[in-house]
């Protein structure tokens, strides 16, 4: 299997977008959706994490930061679910993912090449930070469309970066 950073970026974007949309669906369709959502995310994130491992030495620090942080956040979510603490679960399943996106996309904006790519990720970081702030102020404010919003501000930027990265590499190369 020939894994490139370009194809890895596409997989991250697809799995994140799809997992958030499934999260929204399960949250509406199932009475107790936490376990289904956790296992959906574990399966979805397994794809880019395993692809990162397959990329091996060709992966840069950014890839490893995202893969490691994603695994840690998923472990935290499973721990919060096992603890059955309502406040911890709410933070873990909602606010944490906005904070995770804010930090991750800020770091990404700092290290990627190309001004359009930097702007894309900086904008996503800012939107995630606003979302985290809204969740901290009133956790019900985004209820009903929170995960659709997360798909748009976390998954879609990675999908938009696929052509931006290709364009940047063509200009430089």
Image (cartoon, grey):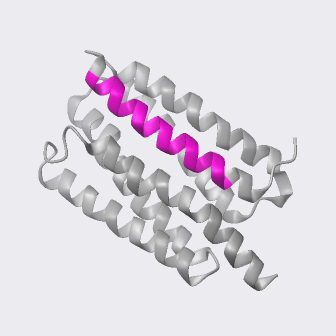
Q: Is residue 115 left or right of residue 147?
A: right
Which stretch did the figure color magenta? 9-28
Reply above or below: 97 against 61: above
Residue 152: horizontal and vertical position, in percent? 39, 53
Q: Quadrant of the N terminus?
A: top right
Residue 71: horizontal and vertical position, in percent? 57, 41
Reply above or below: 114 against 24: below
Let me know if residue 36 is in the magenta part: no
Residue 71 in sight from this viewpoint: no
Q: Is residue 156 left or right of residue 132?
A: right
Q: Nearer the viewer, residue 47 or 166?
A: 166
Q: Nearer the viewer, residue 16 or 129?
A: 16
Q: For the image shown, how many numbered marks are present on the structure?
A: 0
Q: Quadrant of the C terminus?
A: bottom right
Residue drawn at the location 35% of the way across and 53% of the way down: 98
- The quadrant in which residue 161 appears is bottom right
Residue 47: horizontal and vertical position, in percent? 66, 37
Q: Is residue 170 left or right of residue 33?
A: right
Reply above or below: 70 against 39: below
Q: Nearer the viewer, residue 71 or 167?
A: 167
- The quadrant in which residue 21 appears is top left
Residue 14 in sight from this viewpoint: yes
Q: Is residue 152 left or right of residue 94?
A: right
Residue drawn at the location 63% of the way across and 61% of the way down: 162
Residue 145: horizontal and vertical position, in percent? 25, 42
Residue drawn at the location 48% of the way across and 51% of the way down: 155
Prevailing SS of the magenta stretch: helix
């Amino acid at each position: 299997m020939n894994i490139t950073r370009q194809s890895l970026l596409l997989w991250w974007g697809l799995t994140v977008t799809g997992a958030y949309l499934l999260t929204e669906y399960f949250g509406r369709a199932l009475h107790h959706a936490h376990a289904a959502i956790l296992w959906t995310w574990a399966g979805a994130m397994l794809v880019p994490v395993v692809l990162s491992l397959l990329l091996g030495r060709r992966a840069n620090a950014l890839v490893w930061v995202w893969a490691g942080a994603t695994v840690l956040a998923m472990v935290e979510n499973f721990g919060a679910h096992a603890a059955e603490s309502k406040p911890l679960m709410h933070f873990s399943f909602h606010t944490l993912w906005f904070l995770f996106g804010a930090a991750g996309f800020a770091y990404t904006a700092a290290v990627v090449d190309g001004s359009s790519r930097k702007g894309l990720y900086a904008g996503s970081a800012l939107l995630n930070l606003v979302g985290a702030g809204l969740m901290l102020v009133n956790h019900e404010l985004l209820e009903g469309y929170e995960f659709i919003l997360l798909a748009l501000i976390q998954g879609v930027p990675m999908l938009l970066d696929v052509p931006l990265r290709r364009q940047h590499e063509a200009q430089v190369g």
